[in-house]
Amino acid sequence: MTYPSVRHADLEDTGVLITGGGSGIGADLVEGFARQGAKVAFIDIAEEPSRALVERLAAGNVHAPRFFRADLSDVAEAQTAVRDAAAALGSLTVLINNAGWDDRHDLEDVTEDYWDRSQAINLKQMFFVSQAAAPFMKKEGRGAIVNFSSISYLLNMGGMPAYTTAKAGIIGLTKSLAGALGPDGIRANAILPGMIVTERQKRLWLSDEGMAAMIDRQCLKRNLDGTDLVGPCLFLASNASAAMTAQTLVIDGGAL
């Protein structure tokens, strides 16, 4: 895995909050922003990998990341974590809404409780985390929100209807946030990853045959991993995209 070599000077000492930062793509994002010299905090429910990540990144970076445990599906708990993180960082100008739950589920097996839980983790929390972060960005007079959606809702995938519904909804949320917060100098954009190969994906969902089929579909003939999302995320968080808001950025190796 290779992290971007481009340096965004405006991210140095900037307060950055990442949800779902303890493992997988989120951990790559935490490391990517830490390497830029940003002050990074992340929220996750899994303590062991999160604390291990903090320990690993404490050496070699200007600012050690800060971990805040919270169940993001609990609105009060999530918003308290946002406020605690902003206080610890001293400011908050970048929010990366990465956390999600890509559980597979058949149409006939979805119950009302399952549907509500999926929306709470994949969509609802994203709104309320953004709501809690916005006042801190307004105080700074600027900000960038990056929401993680997925190309899955564009592929007519039938094996995860609750998840793909939420991922489609994130695009609407992103555009609404851009309209609501733009007058305060706050931008909101979305990233749509394709097949990102993580240890969790390989353990639960991805087979060699499935990965080969997606690579065959992609223009780029290789597996994508979490570091492929770091550069685009840094771009959307930095002044390099200062006039870009309400947009979506597809990172899928050319699968679509």
Image (cartoon, rainbow, N blue to C red):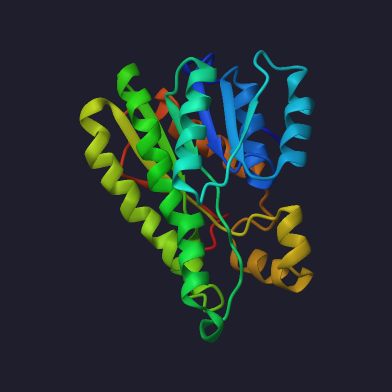
Q: Nearer the viewer, residue 38 or 129?
A: 129
Q: Residue at x 74, y 66 (%)?
A: 204
Can residue 38 be seen in this snapshot?
yes
Measured along the vertical axis of the image, is residue 78 above or below residue 106? above
Left/right placement of residue 107 relative to residue 138 reads right
Q: Residue at x 67, y 71 (%)?
A: 213
Q: Position of residue 99 (x, y in %)?
A: 55, 48
Q: Position of residue 208 (x, y in %)?
A: 78, 69
Q: Nearer the viewer, residue 133 or 175?
A: 133
Q: Position of residue 26 (x, y in %)?
A: 62, 42
Farthest-out residue, left: 183
Q: Nearer the viewer, residue 133 or 12?
A: 133
Q: Position of residue 146 (x, y in %)?
A: 44, 40
Measured along the vertical axis of the image, is residue 216 above or below residue 64? below
Measured along the vertical axis of the image, is residue 214 above or below residue 11? below
Query: Quarter-wise, where is residue 183 in the image?
Result: top left
Can residue 1 be seen in this snapshot?
no
Left/right placement of residue 199 relative to residue 248 reads right
Left/right placement of residue 217 relative to residue 191 reads right
Q: Residue at x 79, y 27 (%)?
A: 56
